[in-house]
Image (cartoon, helix red, strand yellow):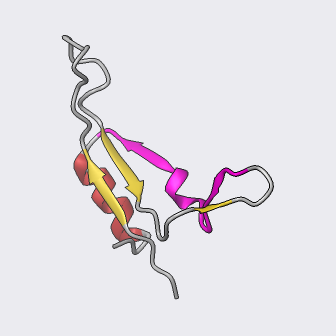
Amino acid sequence: MFTPRAKIYSPAKTAMQSGKAKTGHWVLEFEKPAPGTPDALMGWNTMPNTLSQVKLIFTSKDEAITYATTKKLD
């Protein structure tokens, strides 16, 4: 059975940002299981799994860790 791998991090502010907006939250993001393959018709990269497009936002690190453990994520 495939167990998705996820990483939890707090994003840093960008170089163009002087305030603290868009900081202070935690993101759970799934890792890409395999590299994309080019589509024969359009030439776009296709992914075998769409979990790499999902980003979950939490208000605290503990909430993100609790979610990951209840869903049995690595």
Left or right of 24? Residue 56 is: right
Q: Residue furthest right?
A: 41
Determine whether, in the image, residue 62 is placed left or right of residue 5. left
Image position, residue 61 (x, y; %) = 23, 49
Q: Residue 58 colored magenta?
A: yes
| Quarter occupied by residue 19 | top left
Q: Residue at x 54, y 51 (%)?
A: 53
* Residue in the foreground of this view, choosing between 8 and 49: 49
Q: Position of residue 39 (x, y in %)?
A: 71, 59
Q: Residue furthest bottom?
A: 1
How many numbered markers are drawn? 0
| Extent of the magenta region | 43-59
Against 72, residue 50 (above or below) is: above
**Residue drawn at the location 23% of the way across and 31% of the way down:** 24
Q: Is 56 a magenta residue?
A: yes
Give me the residue at 76% from left, 60% from top: 40
Q: Where's the C terminus, which quadrant? A: bottom left
| Residue 45 x/y as whole percent | 62, 55
- Which picture quadrant has residue 65? bottom left
Q: Residue at x 46, y 47 (%)?
A: 55
From the viewer's perspective, tell me whether residue 74 is left or right of residue 46: left
Residue 10's quadrant in the figure?
top left
Pick the front one: 71 or 3: 3
> Residue 66: x percent and y percent?
32, 61
